Amino acid sequence: MSDQRTYDAMRTASLAIQVDGARAPADPIKFTAIFLALGGSRLAACQSANAAAENAASDATGARVTLESAVTRLGALDRNVFNFIKSVDDETLPPEQKAAVFEAYLFPGGELRDMEDQDRVLQIARKISEIAAGPPPSLPVAGLAPAATVTRVNSWLAIYDGNALIANGGDRETLIATRNDKRDDLENWNTRARGYYIAGSDDGEYSKELAKIGLQPKRMPGEAQPEPKPDAPGTVTFDPATRTLTVTALPGHATSLIAYRQPAGGEVVEAGVSTGTTVSMVSYGPLMPGVTLGLPQYHGQ
């Protein structure tokens, strides 16, 4: 079962992080590096916990089936990371550095080795997640796993761990409680982010900058007219390789792009949000079999 509060928290945090990335260092609303990193880690934790709660089977039998699917997906993602590292040219990633990257991701000698071993698949996936959370200074950035791949790895690891809990006699309530705790942590970060915006402008709570992260600014008396609705969207393209939706341009009066999806037999939920023209369909969890993709909607203030 989806939780709208969780989706609201993830949307606000995602927008705040994306908008901050475009701010100049001297911008008074610019987040500190420490605060930005905290937001990123709390958002990732909330995304993973949400994926685990929403994709947990109702019984041990169903959980074991989902475990098999998760291992298959993780194995494919492990291979994606291996192939990515292998594809980086020698000028960008010299051979000795590439060897170190392969070693760090548990591909010794630059070899894929036995990917039919479930334990090895999980070990590599957890290493991908671990390196993304705190890349060793010795590893060159050019060889690090792509962020989009890491997001999918984290989601499937959360689904695996959640269903492993159920397969071993646990229940979904434990996963839902964890999801709610991570959501509360993220909501607290969002509240502090809102404080940055209020403190960074003489307009305070009336600052229109709040609208950029999906928050409603206060309006002066006489200004309480509704803002214009975003114009109609143009052509929308889905890229199955990157699992993204792309529009040619944000329509007038739009400040962000929100994508939706509907699992088979489930309710419509948000899939991702972007301040640009491309939005990921797997930001808040992986695409499961039978999912229906929703055309993007636009948010504007």
Image: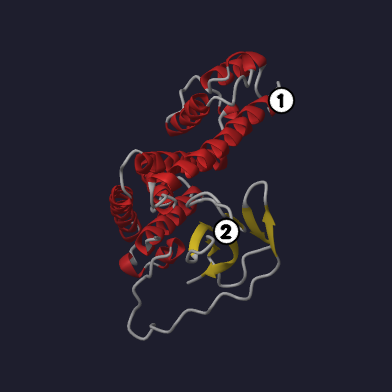
Taking the spot 49% from the left edge, 61% from the top edge, the residue there is 270
Identity, as a three-letter code, of the amino acid under mark 1: Asp
Residue 231 percent across, percent down from the top left: 61, 76
Tell me: residue 254, above or below residue 185: below
**On-image quarter of the N terminus:** bottom left
**Circle 2: residue type:** Val
User: How far from the left and from the top, in percent, is residue 50?
Assistant: 40, 51
Comparing 10 with 90, the one in front is 10
Q: Which residue is mark 2?
A: 291
Q: Residue at x 51, y 64 (%)?
A: 265
The answer to which of marks 2 and 1 sits earlier in the sequence is 1
Kindly report the distance in space between the C-alpha atoms of the residues bearing marks 2 and 1. 36 Å
Please state if 105 lies on the left or on the right of 162 as rendered: right
Q: Residues within 10 Å of mark 2 (few under 14, many from 20)?
A: some
Q: Residues within 10 Å of mark 1 (few under 14, many from 20)?
A: few
Q: Judging from the image, what secondary structure is the residue with disc 2 in?
A: loop
Res. 31 visible in picture: no
31 left or right of 73?
Answer: left
> Quarter of the image holding residue 114?
top right
Query: Foreground residue, 162 or 80?
Result: 162
Label 1: state its secondary structure. loop
> Label 1: which residue?
89
